[in-house]
Amino acid sequence: MIVKRYIEKNLKVIDRLYLKSNSVQKGLFYSKLAILELCGWIEMSMDDIALRTAKRHIRNKDNLKYFNKEIVKKTYGFDYRYHFRRMLMAIIGLRGIEQMEKSLNRSLFDPMCGALTALKPYRDTHAHEYIKGTTLNLDAPSVTLSRFRILYAGLIDVDRALKLKR
């Protein structure tokens, strides 16, 4: 199940702190925190979708353990094509991916992919460095919160489509 309540609450708290911050540096800290929180949630949600799908399709416990250890645990990132789609393909195959993608609501899926693409450079850069000054350009937590809502809707639709794929 894709859990919405905790991440939405966290992002709203970070946004309130951002709005109350009295320095540019604190604002950057909150912006970075919101982005990293959301990206962590995305990866966990994608892993959860992949594991629940695997449990519906894989009967052999050793294969399920293999999938978790060698596919899910070794996937670091949230790009739809390169990370998420590959995890799902290991379970349902390329034909299953075609069927699943055909049944997706494009008005949810396309914005989700766009939001993932927009987040990737922020996450890739800022997850591995510290804030050195105040010249960084980061999205405000309110922008990250709006991306979360787009991503949540898209992931729910992917999850729905995978449940239809038997």
Image (tube, rainbow, N blue to C red):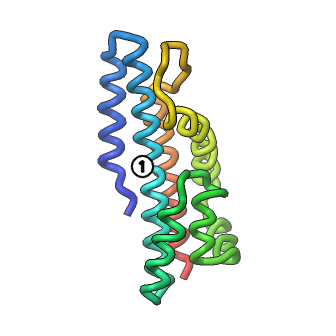
Q: Is residue 93 above or below residue 109?
A: below
Residue beneath the point at 62% across and 71% down: 89
Q: Residue at x 44, y 78 (%)?
A: 65
Q: Which amino acid type is shown beneath numbered disc 1?
A: Trp
Quarter of the figure with residue 118: top right
Looking at the picture, tell me which residue is in the foreground, 104 or 63. Answer: 63
At 30% from the left edge and 40% from the top edge, which residue is drawn?
Answer: 9
Q: Which residue is mark 1?
A: 41
Density class for disc 1 (Cα within 10 Å; few <14, some 14-19, many ≥20) is some
Residue 91 x, y percent position in the rendering: 57, 76
Residue drawn at x 32%, y 38% is 10
Task: Residue lying at the far bottom in this picture: please name it.
Answer: 60
Q: Is residue 142 above or below residue 86?
A: above
Q: Quadrant of the N terminus?
A: bottom left
What secondary structure is found at the residue carrying circle 1? Answer: helix
**Relative to 11, residue 44 above or below:** below
